[in-house]
Amino acid sequence: MIITLTRIDDRLIHGQVCTGWSKELKISRIIVINNKIFKDPLRVKLLKQVSPPSINSHVVNIKKFIKVYNNPKYKNDKVLLLFTNPKDILKTIKRGLKIKSINIGGMSYKEGKIQITDAISVNKKDIKSFYDLNKINIELEIRKVPNDKKINLINILNNIKIN
């Protein structure tokens, strides 16, 4: 499997992913990796329906993704991985996913989170996971679309205070 982009975006498959990233990266598959969404048949169906017709889309849990990731049948597939949060990426890396960079596109505001950019809100668990990812030398870059300038997430986290 050729992972062209690993992205955190809690909106998952939407316009920026479908039109911007998928065309730029010339991917053949989008894989949403989330244990909770995987158990929701309606949400799975909707995510598959909004994917571009020329791109296979899948919604899997972490365990199933690791099986697929290690399957030689998919070794030449160009894939975009989508996660909703950094903790799930960390779990997936601990189970064998090898990546060098994570693109953070959007994490919506909810109670208990603080907004650190116009599209990214984090809580203490998110921050801890991002620092853990940084410790294992994974680049954490913010970009909504491919043409945006990369912004280093750790630089932003180092300058915030959370209660």
Image: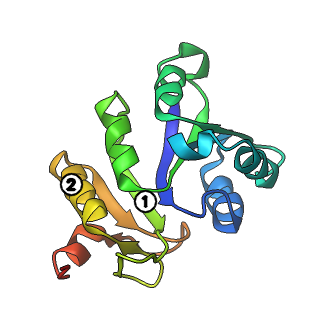
Amino acid carrying mark 2 in the image: Asn
Dot 1 corresponds to which residue? 103
Packing grade of label 1 (10 A; few <14, some 14-19, many >=20) is many
* For residue 65, side relative to residue 157 (left or right): right
Question: Residue 16 sits in which quadrant?
Answer: bottom right
Residue visible at 36% across and 54% down? 86
Amino acid carrying mark 1 in the image: Asn
Element assignment for label 2: helix
Packing grade of label 2 (10 A; few <14, some 14-19, many >=20) is some
Which label's residue is closer to the chain start, 2 or 1?
1
Residue farthest top in this picture: 72
Q: Is residue 73 above or below residue 64?
A: above
Residue visible at 38% across and 45% down? 89
Element assignment for label 1: strand
Dot 2 corresponds to which residue? 134
Where is residue 150 shown, x and y percent of the image?
38, 70
Q: Nearer the viewer, residue 128 or 19?
A: 128
Image quarter (top left, top right, bottom left or bottom right) of the C terminus: bottom left
Instruction: Tell me if I can see residue 34 in this picture.
Output: no
User: What's the CA distance linking mark 2 and mark 1?
Assistant: 13 Å
Residue visible at 73% across and 41% down? 41
Q: Is residue 112 above or below residue 131?
A: below
Label disc, if present, on residue 49 of the rendered structure:
none
Instruction: Tell me if I can see residue 22 in this picture.
Output: yes
Q: Is residue 112 above or below residue 49?
A: below
Q: Nearer the viewer, residue 43 or 10?
A: 43
